Image (spheres, rainbow, N blue to C red):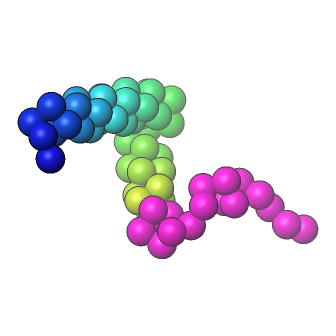
Amino acid sequence: MTSTRLLNEADSKDQYFKELAELSERMIAAHGKEFSMGALVLAARFIAENKPFEQSAVRTS
């Protein structure tokens, strides 16, 4: 990898961490720390288990 590509990748990752921090702050303000942590852990489980996020919102009756 070139140093420019590594720098761009680092900048991209930094931007995602900033977005996660801002989202977490909004969730904490609206619903508390427990909700925010639970939502982020659930998202991590979906990623680890290769589950599509949109499927979680679909409910069957």
- Residue 33 placement (x, y as % from top left): 38, 42
Residue at the farthest right position: 61
State whether residue 51 appears in this view.
yes
**Magenta extent:** 45-61
Tell me, yes or no, whether the highlighted magenta stretch contains residue 17. no
Q: Nearer the viewer, residue 46 or 41?
A: 46
- Residue 54 placement (x, y as % from top left): 67, 53
42 up-or-down from 8: above or below: below
Tell me, yes or no, whether the highlighted magenta stretch contains residue 59. yes
Residue at the farthest left position: 3
Q: Nearer the viewer, residue 24 or 33?
A: 24
Residue at the farthest bottom position: 49
Residue at the location (30% across, 29% down)? 15
State whether residue 34 appears in this view.
no
43 up-or-down from 50: above or below: above
- Residue 41 placement (x, y as % from top left): 40, 58
User: Left of 2 or right of it: where is 40?
Assistant: right
User: Left of 43 or right of it: where is 57?
Assistant: right
Residue at the location (60% across, 61% down)? 52
Residue at the location (43% across, 44% down)? 36
- Residue 14 occupies which quadrant of the picture? top left
Q: Nearer the viewer, residue 3 or 51?
A: 3
